[in-house]
Amino acid sequence: MTDKFLQAAIDEAKKGYNEGGIPIGSVIVYKNKIIGRGHNKRVQNGSAILHGEMDALENTGRLKASVYKECTLYTTLSPCSMCSGTILLYGIPKVVIGENKTFMGEETLLKSRGVELIIANNQECQDLMTKFIAEKPDLWNEDIGE
Amino acid sequence: MTDKFLQAAIDEAKKGYNEGGIPIGSVIVYKNKIIGRGHNKRVQNGSAILHGEMDALENTGRLKASVYKECTLYTTLSPCSMCSGTILLYGIPKVVIGENKTFMGEETLLKSRGVELIIANNQECQDLMTKFIAEKPDLWNEDIGE
């Protein structure tokens, strides 16, 4: 059974897909509670920076460093350089990743800085991205700077 | 004399300071023209992700990868992990940095990935940050996750 927090991130990803956007979702968990959630808003907001993880962090709002250091970030896809850099900036110690088969982010960098990564190998995450990439390859390439 | 593009980033930083915010500014230059500008909006927008560089990229809007790869990013301060990760995501090849004395960002990582860095050692950038950090140390620590 899918972890309830990863499921919440998947629900965000599906919401993005249904809006015509890029189906990547994320939630921020603190003390076993979701304190922020979001999904990629490139299409919806014309945004260059609102990847799923960034949208979740923005929706969470301003936090003290001490709070981030007790958070877990859930994301449906392996985090890109931008989102990984943000995880490092705030010292988020643990990241649960839905899948890294359709895109491999900066996992090596994150691990080298001591971030704990859990790869869920979730089939629903992978199927959703595979479908999206086949449907809108140009949009996907734009999102990852390719 | 200060480079006109760095001066535009400094003007953004001063605007931020005058709004009661964190005085870091940035501009994006493409084919010798500013195509986007911004400044840190933590205070103004209650934002956890709008550092100066991120605000400039967001204000620039969606671009194709081929455009980013011909851009230069100007920033008044050495870019943190988040902003450096974003530079890497989009393959921005050159970054002009006002100063790195009050804060040293991910310059080693950027250089190791082939990004050209020019450190201007600009006194106005350094004075503005020094004054701000002395005035609002807690706000500054929040911005850099410390």
Image (cartoon, coloured by chain):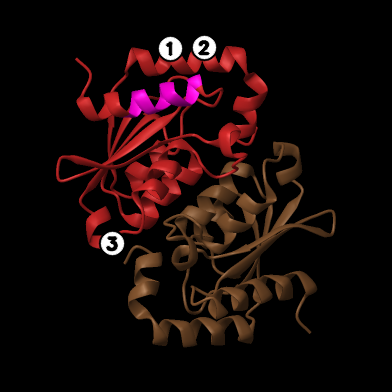
Chain colours: A brown, B red
Disc 1 and disc 3 in contact, CB within 8 angstroms:
no
Q: Is residue B27 magenta?
A: no
Q: Which mark is residue B65?
A: 3
On whether disc 3 and disc 2 are found on a single subunit, the reply is yes
Q: Is residue A10 above or below residue B126?
A: below
- Please, what secondary structure does the residue beneath circle 2 have? helix
Name the outermost residue toward the left. Answer: B31
Distance from Cα at disc 3 to Cα at disc 2: 37 Å
Q: Is residue A128 above or below residue B61?
A: below
- Please, what secondary structure does the residue beneath circle 1 have? helix
Residue at 54% in and 76% down: A19
Residue at 24% in and 30% down: B5
- The kind of residue on which mark 3 rests is Ala
Q: Which residue is mark 1?
A: B127
User: Could you say where residue B51 lies in the image, as x and y percent from the top left?
Assistant: 49, 38
Decide which of A140, B121 is in the foreground and name it.
Answer: A140
Residue density around tag 1, few if under 14, some if 14–19, many if 20 or more, within 10 Å: few
Disc 2 and disc 1 in contact, CB within 8 angstroms:
yes
Q: Which mark is residue A93?
A: none
Residue at 44% in and 50% down: B85
User: Could you say where residue B134 lies in the image, as x and y percent from the top left?
Assistant: 59, 12
* A35 with respect to A51 (left or right): right
